[in-house]
Amino acid sequence: MNNIASTAMPGFSPVPAESVAWLGTAPVPAAPYYSPAYYELEREAVFRRSWLQLGHVSELPEPGSFIRREVEVLKASVLLVCGRDGQIRAFHNVCTHRGTQLVEAEAGRAGNFSCPYHRWSFSTDGRLLSAPDFESFGLTKEECALPAIALEICGGLIFVNFAPKISLREEMGPFADWLEKFPCAQATQFSEYVYEINGNWKLTYDNFQENYHLRFIHPRTGGAAVSDENPFGYPVKYGFHGPHRTQTIWSNPNVKPTPLQAISFGKGAQFAMADGLAGPHARDYLALFPNFFVIGTPAQSFSHTIWPLGPERSRGVIRLYWKGEDDCASRRFAREYALASARDIHAEDRAVIEAGQRGLSSGALKYVHFQVQEALCRHLFNNVNERVEAYKAELAGGAA
């Protein structure tokens, strides 16, 4: 399904209700935001069968470069490796002898990978190179290659899928071309911070895909998207393609930067994002199912991935993308200020997300409610729930 809902500019009026009515208007059940049973279904129905964003090509700059990523929701450890041929591949971080994890380092460079237990050795393209007394196993080396994971790259971002049915680009449709024009596609490095929160992954994600809360939670930092003309900072446009969605963020034309912002994002912006990374999607937010989004704001373009750690806990990974080195003090200052600003804004959300989780986990509510301008929240819930219900039917059919 490919749907676009928009409102004309200049001036502002909210996206009309009828344009997103196809998403439904009924309350949605609260239990999926805290139920352990529902979380177990999500693990298999959603995360094992979806394209998951794990890294950026700048992390694997040369043959032998590797990074290890833990995907706790699937109890998986993933090894991303740049082979001698320059191709990036993904493998399960497990020795094919008896399952011992090969790599403990988070990142590095290696000519091969040797199991610490019995010294089975593997190449950067996953082949078994050698194993002590291998002849006694009655196996071929080809049978003992590292188990591969499907990997695709789009917009400089690395995605993997543990049980792919279609390619990433097929699933993304027109949004694949969008992503190729976001700053991450040109970036050569990034800044990152990671947080953990006592909140279900969907509840945490929802906070970052609706603007209804901006004037209440971000009265000091949300001025760029809030004004008398648009008091809730509602978006200009929504778009949908399959399980993915986008919105165009409204920008307050009358906002006045603070003196520090003027230095960093004004005159100093030439040292931050104005070096060719703003691009055509400078006010667009692109959410890729299930747990990733990227926003192309010129001052601090960033991505945000939210990983489930349990039914009531999650981890967020936020990255700001840059092109080129920090080759002068002004550029370094602008980038550090952008990272600090992003962290400050997101820190304002943490307490209310956790308060919402405590309320939902109490069982006091049977339903939660989404209004028209929380359309992206409803879209995420609908797509997760559709996959969970289909998986339940699949299990029931297998049992029969």
Image: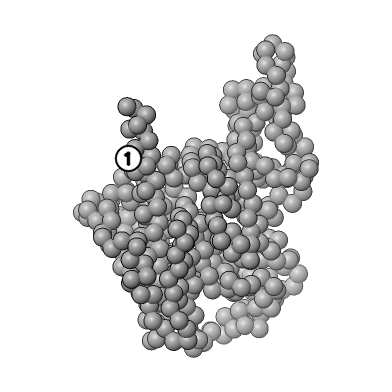
For the rendered model, the colour scheme is: one colour
The answer to whether residue 316 is seen in the rendering is no
Quadrant placement of the C terminus: top left
Q: Which residue is mark 1?
A: 37
Q: Nearer the viewer, residue 238 or 134?
A: 238
Residue located at (54% from left, 41% from top)? 164
Say if 367 sits above or below 43 in the image: below
Q: Kindly indicate the quadrant of the structure image that contains residue 131.
A: top right
Answer left or right for 178 relative to 240.
Answer: right
Residue type, mark 1 in image: Ala
The percent coordinates of residue 13 (x first, y second) are 39, 81
The percent coordinates of residue 269 (x first, y second) are 65, 78
Residue located at (62% from left, 83% from top)? 266
The percent coordinates of residue 366 (x first, y second) are 22, 53
The percent coordinates of residue 320 (x first, y second) are 60, 64
Residue located at (70% from left, 74% from top)? 275
Quadrant placement of the N terminus: bottom left
Say if 101 sits above or below 188 in the image: above
Residue located at (67% from left, 28% from top)? 145
Element type at mark 1: helix
Q: Nearer the viewer, residue 195 or 87?
A: 87
The answer to whether residue 262 is seen in the rendering is yes
Say if 218 sits above or below 384 in the image: below
